[in-house]
Image (cartoon, rainbow, N blue to C red):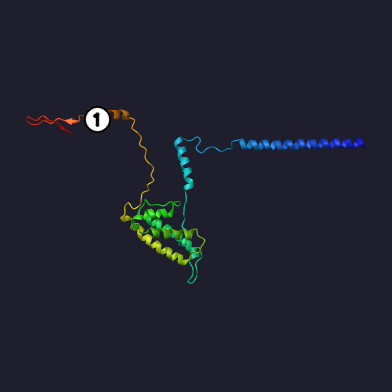
Amino acid sequence: MVEQLSGVTVVIFIACGVLTVILLFIFAKRQIMRFALRSRRGPHVAVGHDADKGLRMEMERRLDVIPRIVHEPKLINEDDTRYILPPGSLFPPFYYRLKAVDDVKTLEAEILKQDSSMHRHPTENLRAFLLSSLAAPLDGSGQKMVHQFCDMYEHARHDPADFGDEEYQAFSCLLVKLMEAAKLLKSFPNSRKTSPNRTPVRRVPDPSKPRTNTVDVKLQLRDENLSRPSTLTVPAGEGDSSETPV
């Protein structure tokens, strides 16, 4: 009985040992494959790897421009039947918000129509754009109106508070005044304020022209000052031989 138990125990130990070795082999193989896949370069190849330098730079430039591609579409179409309601019906609560956003695009289109150089990118601040483009027609007195207009625009676009018919009517009154100011842009050719933060232009010296040493110029001027006479002899009349100092 003892011999049978000892034989069974040996078999059990051998089986456990074989199972442990198999599990360790599977775990080690999996870890090796994981590190191999992590360290191996994938099939990715840089864009324009075999192209010319000019073509590769142009491809990289266009790829860098992609994050700046932004478009603000028109939110309410004229042919949209959802907003053609019978008399006495109320518009949805978000209708006036959409209308206010579209009205801002109408104002931008009018400014661009009067001056083709005044184009606002969707990522550009609307308040700064209106203050700079309409500064001349408003003559500095309409800054408060521009701030009120932009505050109501931000209210319509981002503020969770109610923006209904009453708020939209006040917004429309400010819009009409700004549209009238935008139509006067043609009478102000240089109406947009120029930004003071401009990139300075670095002047590259011409290699064909000889460079003048600053030390030599200073020494030359010093010698001229030393050799310059301090008095000037003026021919006088008979019996007068005096010199007139200068």
In the picture as drawn, the residue positioned furthest to the left comes out as: 238
Find disc 1 in the rendering and name its residue.
Answer: 225
- Considering depth in this image, is 134 or 37 the residue closer to the camera? 134
| Residue in the picture at 18% in, 30% down | 231
- Specify whether 92 is left or right of 201: right
In the image shown, does 113 or 199 lie closer to the viewer? 199
Q: Amino acid at mark 1?
A: Asn
Q: Tell me: residue 113, above or below residue 213.
A: below
Residue at horizontal 73%, vertical 35%? Answer: 25
Q: Identify the image quadrant of residue 238.
A: top left
How far from the left and from the top, in percent, is residue 76? 47, 60
The C terminus sits in image quarter: top left
Total numbered circles:
1
**Which part of the image, by quadrant, shows the N terminus?**
top right
Image position of 188 with respect to 11: above or below: below
Residue 206, above or below 185:
above
Residue 174 x, y percent position in the rendering:
40, 62
x and y percent of residue 75 in the render? Answer: 48, 59
Q: Nearer the viewer, residue 228 or 77?
A: 228
Describe the element under mark 1 as helix, strand or loop. Answer: helix
| Farthest right residue in view | 1
46 relative position to 174: left or right: right
Residue 141, image quadrant: bottom left
Along the viewing direction, whichever of 219 and 50 lies nearer the viewer: 219
Residue at position x 47%, y 37% from top?
56
- Residue 186 is left or right of residue 73, and the answer is left
Q: Position of residue 218 (x, y in %)?
A: 29, 30
